[in-house]
Image (cartoon, rainbow, N blue to C red):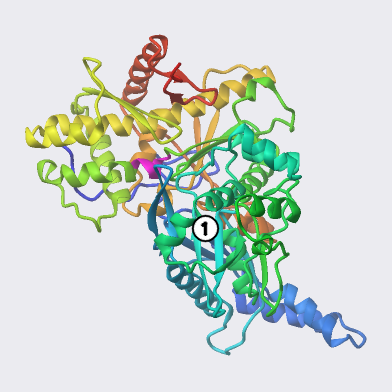
Amino acid sequence: MVEQTERTNPVLSKPSQGGELSDGLPPEESPRLQETSPVTAKEYILSSIWELLVASNRKIAPEIVFQMLKEKLRIIVAIDQGTSTTKMHSMQADGTFSDYPWRRAKSEIVTIDERQARIMTPEQLRENIEWIQEMIKVISTEPESGLVFPVVVLLTSYQHSLAVQVVSEEEEISSFALLCDPTLNPVLSDQMIDELRERGLSEPVVELLTTGKRSWLTKLVTFFRHNDDFRSSLDIPQEAEFYFSTVPGYIASVLSGGELGIIPDSESALPGCSEEDLHILCEYFGFSQDCVTIDKEQDCNGLQVEMIGDLQAELLAIQDFLERRGKSETIVVSTDSVGKIFVTGLNGKPTLSMGGFKQKENIDAYYSTTRYGAGGTCMFLKPVLIAASDCLELDVNEGTNFYNLVDRLCNGWLKELKQENPLPSTDFYFAPMENGDYLLLDTEGNKHELMQLVDSLVQAADKEKLEALLMAIINGSAFSFREMIQAIHEAKNADSGSNGSFPNEVAFYGGLLPHSNEGRGLLGWIIASLPHGTSILQLPFDTAVQAALYNSSINEVAKNDGVYLIKPIPRKPGRLSDMYQVWKEYQKSLIEEGMLVQTTTGGVTFPKSS
């Protein structure tokens, strides 16, 4: 029986001097760095001005005073323009952090090459930017005095996505954004590549196009090749001129008073790509050479706008956080809709054992990503829970917070597990794949399409089998994370010559932590499948924007505090670990039979057809 009652807040405390820890899951609200701030923002501002005046024994030019005050009093606002939500956080002059409600991003779905792409219409993108502008105005204004403080805006996420600004003959400006869910990689024939080479396209750009890397450049080529589809779906006028930009780049140009879309001059996003390369692509696909412009961000209205990739922001924050604590053995897991596994402390040495993992330049960390993150699990279960809601006696509708609902289901099962009640039977095997696909089998080895199976179980009113199916999907998600953690641990051991069958320490952040405000069930499911000997950390940031603010913080007190140690959830000896071992052994047999192929990063995929 799945319990639907509210779960009480878990008990969690910071380590005492004697090292005792309270059992429990992460706190309902993630630790925030402002808890360590010794003074208020206003006190900090006044003391900064006073210190400046006291230190001035001679006349100081007004512009120098202004610049010094600007540095002292500036507010940093970090913004993440995601496919589903826009997240915003700020850091005041005294180093304190503030969170703001997330804004659900409106978007439309179009089909390109039989793949679905998420886009924003011109009106949706404009509404989003207007909301950002209004929020910056609120954040930067001191309500009592009306003083407006200098602001630095950090834009993270989707540097590789595409925004298009359209200028018609009547000089009407509109815009839309092509987001990267899922990745759209154009397939270019060898003949097309040879023709582009003959036109002078540089080899680094040819490599980007032929390897299909996740880059906004591939989105640009996709747009060129499918321009009519986009134009007709968005009613873009035929005679329009186009200016292309990354989504954060377009937002940056609007915030800083620019009139044209921009492509940031960023080597990390475009290694070796010049304006000439882009003009060659435009001409090849039948566009005017004037349709692309490359420009640096303009500080037109005094608003300083900077951009940093979301992954880079997270990696830098993780690296700094762990280095401050001497934790070179920690594996870091993001439980977001796109899951990420990181390992640091390899001293930047390339190694064959880490061949399946990626690395960012100048960052001592390897990482792996999977589109089947913990948040993705919740969204994957959404149509299942809607279809089976009556049979499972769940109050479910389109407005339901499915992160909360999945957590409640998991918490109910975890409570039964602690009480030694029998869990729903494991009548199904479920394996998510890194590309978003999945394998679903019953105990007899029959393969099923998920929603067809759900419909048949609902028709049969088989509540027990439906609960077993939900359990299998959650097991597959949690245990796949467990496999990826193990894979990166073993790869690191092979590199360093270390021993140890399980990781010493695993840190979690992101995804379910901010999305679900009723519990941590699915996160607990992942944690509980780890061995008892693995210590668990929760990082003091959950999102890329919080990580970007952490990187910008000059408050050393805040950076050196805020870490919470947590134990795996209380459980009877190894019950979830045993379930993981059963799941793993069955998956191993499928790999041996050739039904699945193990990836170098611990995931699975279908074998390539001959």
- Secondary structure category for the residue under label 1: loop
Q: Which residues are magenta?
A: 373-377
| Main secondary-structure element of the magenta-colored stretch | helix
Rendering coords of residue 578 (x, y %): 34, 20
Q: Residue at x 75, y 43 (%)?
A: 202
The outermost residue toward the right is 58
Camera-nearest residue between 91 and 158: 158
Q: Residues within 10 Å of mark 1 (few under 14, many from 20)?
A: many
Q: Is residue 389 left or right of residue 271?
A: left
Q: Amino acid at mark 1?
A: Arg
The outermost residue toward the left is 460
Q: Is residue 601 left or right of residue 553?
A: left
Q: Is residue 345 above or below residue 149?
A: above
- Check the picture and name the quadrant holding the N terminus: top left
Q: Is residue 370 above or below residue 148?
A: above
Camera-nearest residue between 552 and 247: 247
Rendering coords of residue 408 (x, y %): 26, 45
Residue that label 1 marks: 32
Camera-nearest residue between 303 and 413: 303
- Res 583 seen here: yes
Q: Residue at x 74, y 82 (%)?
A: 49
- Res 361 seen here: no
- Check the picture and name the quadrant holding the C terminus: top left
Q: Is residue 404 left or right of residue 210?
A: left
